[in-house]
Image (spheres, rainbow, N blue to C red):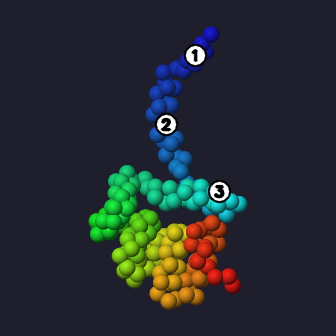
Amino acid sequence: MTLRLRLPAAALVALFAFWPLALAAAPLDREALADRLFERLAAATTEEEGRRAEDSIWEMWIDHPDAGIRDAIALGMRQREAYDWDAALETFSGVIEREPGYAEGWNQRAFIHFLKGDYDASLADLEKTLELEPRHFGALAGVGLIYLSTNRFDEGQDILRQAVALHPFLKERRMLVPQ
C-alpha cells in the first residue's frame, strides 16, 4: 500500500516559493561550529582524537563560501607542495586582495614567506591571521617557530604554550622546554 500525500496546488506553490527563504533564514553559524570543534579538540584524550579534531578545524578554516577562493587556496597549496613558492605567493596574495577578511589566505601566504626565509613578512601575515582568527593554533605555532629561529627563545616558548593551550596535541609541543 502506498501512502500519497496530496497537497493543494496553492500549498505546493507556497512551499517551493518560500523554500529559499527558509534556507537563508538558517545560515550555518561558523562561530558556533568553530566553538564546537575547539571544544572537541580540548576534550580529546588521545593523539588520534586530537588529530581528527585538528583536521576538522583546518577544513573549517580552509572552507570559504566562494568557490573561486576555495579553488585558489587549493591551487596555492598544490603550488607549495610542488615547491613553486613564487607562484604560491602570487596565488595567496590574490586571495588576500579578493578577500582580505579571510584569515586562512593570510596564514597560507605567511607559510610561503616562512619557507622563503622572509620572517618579517611571515610575522606580519601571521599577525593579521591572528587578528582575524585569534584561536588559529597554526599561526601561533608559526610565530613561535619564527621566534625560536631568530633567537627570541622566551617569546617563542610563550607563544608555543598559547598554541598548545588551544591544541594539546600540537606537533610543535615537543619543542617546549618544561618550566
Q: Can you tell which quarter of the image residue 120 is in?
A: bottom left
Q: Which residue has dot 3 on it?
A: 49
Q: Single out the mark in the foreground, 1 or 3.
A: 3
Assign a secondary structure to mark 2: helix
- Is residue 175 toward the left or the right of residue 98 in the image? right
Q: Which residue has dot 1 on it?
A: 4
Q: Single out the mark in the foreground, 2 or 1.
A: 1
Residue lying farthest to the top in this orientation: 1
Instruction: Confirm or deny contact between disc 2 and disc 3 (CB under 8 A).
Output: no
Label 2 vs label 3: CA separation? Answer: 38 Å
Q: Residue at x 40, y 81 (%)?
A: 119
Q: Residue at x 32, y 68 (%)?
A: 85
Q: Can you tell which quarter of the image residue 107 is in?
A: bottom left
Label 1 vs label 3: CA separation? Answer: 45 Å
Binning the other alpha carbons within 10 Å of mark 3 as few (below 14), some (14 to 19) or many (20 upward) gives some
Q: Nearer the viewer, residue 168 or 5?
A: 168
Task: Say if residue 171 shows up in the picture.
Answer: yes
Q: Position of residue 156 (x, y in %)?
A: 55, 83
